Amino acid sequence: MLLAAFTVVTQIQCQQSNHSSEPITTEEFDKIISGEKLVMVDFYTTWCGPCKKMAPFIERIRNEQSKTVIVLKIDAEAQMDIADRYRLEGYPTVIFFKKGQVIGRSLGYTDYDGLMTLVNKMK
C-alpha cells in the first residue's frame, strides 16, 4: 500500500514542469528547451529504483538553481512522444539543452554532487 502511494505521489510530482499536475505537452516541451536558459531534463520511469533514488537530487537542483536552470521531469513511458526522440538507452537519463540543442547527456544514477558538476559545466 505504501509503495503504491509513493508511486502515485512520485508520478504526479515528477510530471510537473510548470507546477501543474498535468504532463507537459510536446509543444510546451519544445518551447521550453528552445529558450536561452539551460534546461535539464530527467527522463525516468515509475518502476526504476535508481530514478527514485535520484529524484530528491533533481528536485533540490530545481529549487536551488531555478535562476539559472529549468528542470523538467519526463516519465519516459507516459510521454513516449517526447522520450522516443532521444533514443534513451536506460533510466535515469538526464539530457541538457540550450537553444533547442542537446549539449550534454548522462545515463544512470548520479548523486547530487555529480549532477551539480554537470549543471555547472553546461551553464
Image: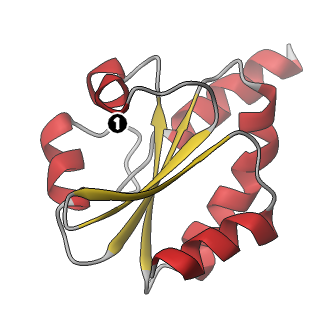
* Residue 43 to residue 79: above or below: below
Q: Residue at x 70, y 24 (%)?
A: 7
* Residue 118 to residue 82: above or below: below
Q: How is the image coloured?
A: secondary structure
Measuring from the top left, give residue 89's x and y in whole percent.
55, 24
Q: Residue at x 28, y 29 (%)?
A: 85
Measuring from the top left, give residue 26's x and y in whole percent.
19, 36
Q: Residue at x 83, y 19 (%)?
A: 3
Image quadrant where residue 11 sits = top right
> Which quarter of the figure is the C terminus placed in?
bottom left
Q: Kindly state the secondary structure of the residue where label 1 is placed.
A: loop
Left or right: 60, with 101 as reference point: right
Measuring from the top left, give residue 31's x and y in whole percent.
14, 56
Q: Residue furthest bottom?
A: 67
Q: Nearer the viewer, residue 102 or 79?
A: 102
Q: Residues within 10 Å of mark 1 (few under 14, many from 20)?
A: few
Image quadrant where residue 4 sits = top right
Q: Please give the residue where the numbered disc 1 appears in the rendered image.
A: 22
Q: Residue at x 23, y 59 (%)?
A: 32
> Which quarter of the figure is the N terminus placed in?
top right
Amino acid under label 1? Glu
Q: Nearer the viewer, residue 46 or 2?
A: 46
Number of numbered discs visible in the structure rendering: 1
